[in-house]
Amino acid sequence: MLKQIYDEGLDAHFVTFACYRRRRLLDHDAARVIVVETLRNRLLKQQAQCYGFVVMPDHVHAVIWFPCAGKLSSFMQQWKQASSFHIQRLFRTALWKYSEMIGGEDPVWHKRYYDFNIFSQKKLREKLEYMHSNPVRAGLVRSAEEWPYSSAKFYETGESVGVPVVCPL
């Protein structure tokens, strides 16, 4: 993974990464749970904070903050690598017919990810609103807090969403 040139400050990072060929590899709840659990584990291991996330059928958004610079690239590599391993195992064992249909030998994720440095409270609100409204725009739910693979419910009700979310607003 290429080191992001803007990973030298202490800004939060709005990251996006997509499934290989934008396939809907995360259509199944079990696959989405893997992505969320892996995010939680990576946050704890790297002492990072999550300000928000959403797992969609073909891509993932998250806002991550690190207490020291230069951590994003390794965080993303490890998050994608670990979740890919577990998703591929899920496909081989429990969802093997689905795996055959979509080309189970392909990678789970595109190699790269998109990173946007968040430098203000206004920009953070904008990115959280954009991210949380993804499932609504996609027609998956009527309101953002209904989507169980997102931090929107935390922001609306304060309930746990499987990942420790920090509200810096």
Image (cartoon, rainbow, N blue to C red):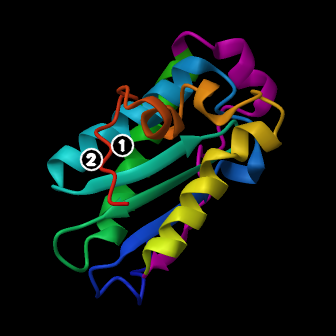
Distance from Cα at disc 1 to Cα at disc 2: 5 Å
At a point 38% along the width and 54% down the height, the residue shown is: 51
What count of labels does the image hold?
2
Residue 74 percent location from the top left of the image:
30, 65
Q: Which residues are magenta?
A: 93-119
Position of the N terminus, as image quadrant, is: bottom left
Q: Specify the farthest residue to the top.
A: 94
**Residue 111 seen in the figure:** no
Residue position for label 2: 42
Q: Is residue 169 magenta?
A: no
State whether residue 87 is above or below residue 70: above
Q: Nearer the viewer, residue 47 or 95?
A: 47
State whether residue 52 is above or below residue 159: below
**47 relative position to 85: left or right:** left
Residue 82 percent location from the top left of the image:
37, 42
**Residue 52 seen in the figure:** yes
Q: Give, as a three-letter code, the residue at label 2.
A: Arg
Whether label 1 touches label 2, CB < 8 Å: yes
Rendered image: mark on residue 99: none
**Kind of element beneath mark 1:** helix
Dot 1 surroundings within 10 Å: few (below 14), some, or many (20 or more)? many
At a point 62% along the width and 24% down the height, the residue shown is: 146
**166 relative position to 132: left or right:** left
Residue 19 percent location from the top left of the image:
66, 48
Residue 123 percent location from the top left of the image:
53, 74
Residue position for label 1: 39
**Kind of element beneath mark 2:** helix
Q: Give, as a three-letter code, the residue at label 1.
A: Leu
Position of the C terminus, as image quadrant, is: bottom left
Q: Is residue 104 magenta?
A: yes
